[in-house]
Amino acid sequence: MKNRWFLLLSAAIVLFSCQSSTQTETIQVDSTAVALEDGVQLIPIQTPKGEFKVWTKRVGDNPTMKVLLLHGGPGMTHEQYANFKDYLPQENIEFIWYDQLGSANSDQPEDSTLWTIERFVDEVEQVRIALGLNKDNFYLYGQSWGGMLGMEYAFKHQDKLKGLIISNMMASLDDYEKYAKEVLGPQMPPAVFAELMEIEKNNDFENPRYMELLGEHHYPQHVLRMPPNEWPEEINRMMGQVNPNVYVYMQGYSEFGITPGASLEGWDVKDQLKNISVPTLVIGGTHDTMDPKHMEWMSTAVQNGRFLLCPNGSHLSQYDDPDHFFPGLIQFIKDVDSGAF
């Protein structure tokens, strides 16, 4: 169905709105079944609410180039990086798919006190230790929310990093909201944008028109520049597995900023970027939901940065502009490994 994943996400959000955020029931992964797959490692994570397991899968083996992938959302899945297997192994670059706590193959506790940036940073550090990653081999790649998490990890643990990749993410959510409402929104037909803003003003996110309008006028233009019925199956699967308990609590319902009251509201680290000294690649798309000029500036704000613009890309540039995305990513990893950058 043309708008299948939009409807799945909308249904998930509606379901979440009927649930209590204080539930503590945990969905546990079937570790016996998952562990049968080659390269999979279930990593125990210690949290203030006890121990849980998160799922990782290693692809390839290189002692000096290992890339841990942080997915977006929050609450999405590693499947947004499914096509990395078509590019990185051929260049002898090892990478690790990883579902964060609350996502897909990992445990899914429903205690909202776990959904904080600080706890996710601690989780990434525990994953790093379990996987044997260190400053001689550890590249951290984060896209969208994963980019936020990657920046926050670097502020605390950059001495463990060999390289950092921030993809399709700005350093300020207020700046993101301004870009969405002042630049992207007005590119829509005026009546469409006005209706979307009216829905947001009335907090009427269960209105099916919201997702219908976004599905026609926003997602194919700025999230993945393909007709929705041609989107890769792995992206459809990912959207069908979004965990609304995490996504809505941290991000909220809006596609034009962070919903007031969501835990990420007000996040801004522009002034901290100057403290990142590790080699850093910032990736943006011309048609991104995020401002490409802001992302280019980020590459100059860190001490040792490079910017990669995907001219045909949007928020998922690895899919709609792979001809620019992957050569630029691979070159950065190899340049850092060789000492050329």
Image: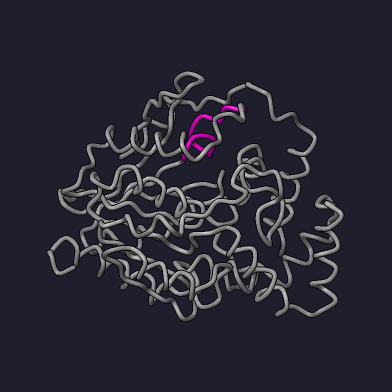
Q: What's the magenta bit mostly, secondary-structure-wise?
A: loop
For residue 46, above or below residue 72: above
Q: Nearer the viewer, residue 158 or 74?
A: 158
Position of the C terminus by quadrant? bottom left
Where's the N terminus, which quadrant?
A: bottom right
Residue at image coords 42%, 72%: 297
Give the residue drawn at x 83%, y 71%. Answer: 194
Image position, residue 132 (x, y; %): 22, 37
Q: Quadrant of residue 263?
A: top right
User: Would residue 333 be counted in the magenta stretch?
Assistant: no
Task: Inspect this view and state whether residue 241 appears.
Answer: no
Residue situated in front as seen by the camera: 119 or 207: 119
Q: Residue 124: name its quadrant.
A: top left
**Residue 117 located left or right of residue 2:** left
**Extent of the magenta region:** 100-110
Residue 107 lies within the magenta run: yes
